[in-house]
Amino acid sequence: MPTQPASPAWLRETPNGITLAVRAQPGAKRTAIVGIYGEGESAQLKIAVQAPPVEGRANDALIDFLARKFNLPKSSVQIVTGELSRSKVFVMSGVSIADAIQRLAP
């Protein structure tokens, strides 16, 4: 029986979906995944965001970007920690680890 490859530290499975640890880079030229921030258990998926970090615009842009990337309604993507920080954790309902790895691959 083949084993499933280990998921990255920034991606965790939950009973209803996944959590995704993100390092936001607001004020970028375009919104895109730009790599990994940090190492080991504290690693985060680094996402550049075109929106500025004022009045929640960068958070809204991240939610919109992740919803489109995973083909989910925006209501299925929520910030659980880090609303006022560059380091954030999102929970996405209805997404499997395997699907997340496939959709986040370069």
Image (tube, helix red, strand yellow):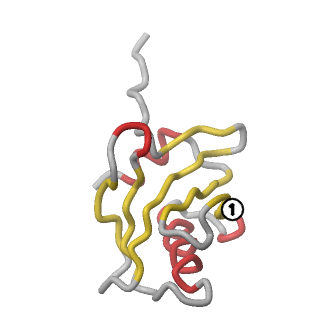
The residue where tag 1 is placed is: 76
**Residue 76, x across and y down, in percent:** 69, 62
**Residue 60, x across and y down, in percent:** 59, 79
The relative height of residue 81 versus residue 10 in the rendered view (above or below) is below
Q: Is residue 23 left or right of residue 106?
A: right
Q: Quadrant of residue 41?
A: top left
The relative height of residue 97 versus residue 32 in the rendered view (above or below) is above
Which image quadrant: the N terminus? top left
What residue occupies the far top of the structure in this picture?
1
104 or 54, nearer to the observer: 54
55 or 20, nearer to the observer: 55
For the point 63% across and 55% down, the residue is 92
For the point 39% across and 67% down, the residue is 47
**Residue 94, x across and y down, in percent:** 66, 49
SS at badge 1: helix
The residue type indicated by label 1 comes to Ser
